[in-house]
Amino acid sequence: MDSPEFEGYEREPISQGYFRLYKSKSLKKSSGIIVDHLENYEVVELRERHKERYGKDIEILDTLSGWALVLTFVQLKHGIGYLPEFIVREKKDLKEVKLDIAPIQYSICMIKLKSSPLTRAESAFLDILRAAYP
């Protein structure tokens, strides 16, 4: 948001967390991970950190369009998914796959024009989001 093209906007954080690897608790073995897009910052960063730490590329099993689809494939035991924490909240059938690299952080933010105040409905909606994703 520091770019000149965003100077008329303001950002307010709602929630934050980390991208992590998750698998079905009943998945015995997987040869790679499933991501939503290879070009996304978090996927590029994961690949760079993995290569730096382990000296080799992390194996990408598949790329799918969207975190919900990645989650579905993981729950169907089709691999290990690289997902933000808020997507897997309360999914008792999944467990985190640990890597010895720092996780990539994300932030969920509200972005709005600086010159436009929030309506009561918009403020109430933001309060609901903050309560749902602490």
Image: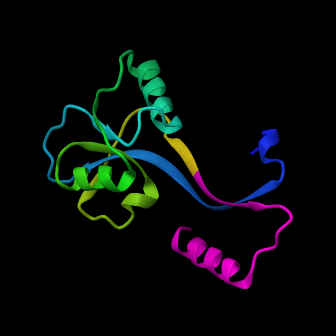
Percent coordinates x, y for residue 88 in the rendering:
37, 59
Q: Residue furthest right?
A: 115
Depth order, front residue of 61/101: 61
Percent coordinates x, y for residue 62 in the rendering:
27, 36
Q: Residue furthest top?
A: 55
Q: Which residues are drawn in magenta?
A: 107-134
Q: Residue at x 61, y 78 (%)?
A: 125
124 within the magenta span: yes
Left or right side of 108 for 77: left
Left or right side of 113 for 100: left
For the C terminus, the quadrant is bottom right
Q: Residue at x 60, y 53 (%)?
A: 107
Percent coordinates x, y for residue 128 in the rendering:
58, 78
130 within the magenta span: yes
Depth order, front residue of 81/110: 110
For the N terminus, the quadrant is top right
Q: Residue at x 82, y 73 (%)?
A: 117
How many numbered tags mark residues here? 0
Q: Residue at x 27, y 65 (%)?
A: 92
- The colour scheme of the drawn protein is rainbow
Q: Quadrant of residue 54?
A: top left
Vertical order, 47 against 121 (above or below): above
Percent coordinates x, y for residue 58 in the rendering:
34, 26
Depth order, front residue of 21/1: 1
Left or right side of 20 for 69: left
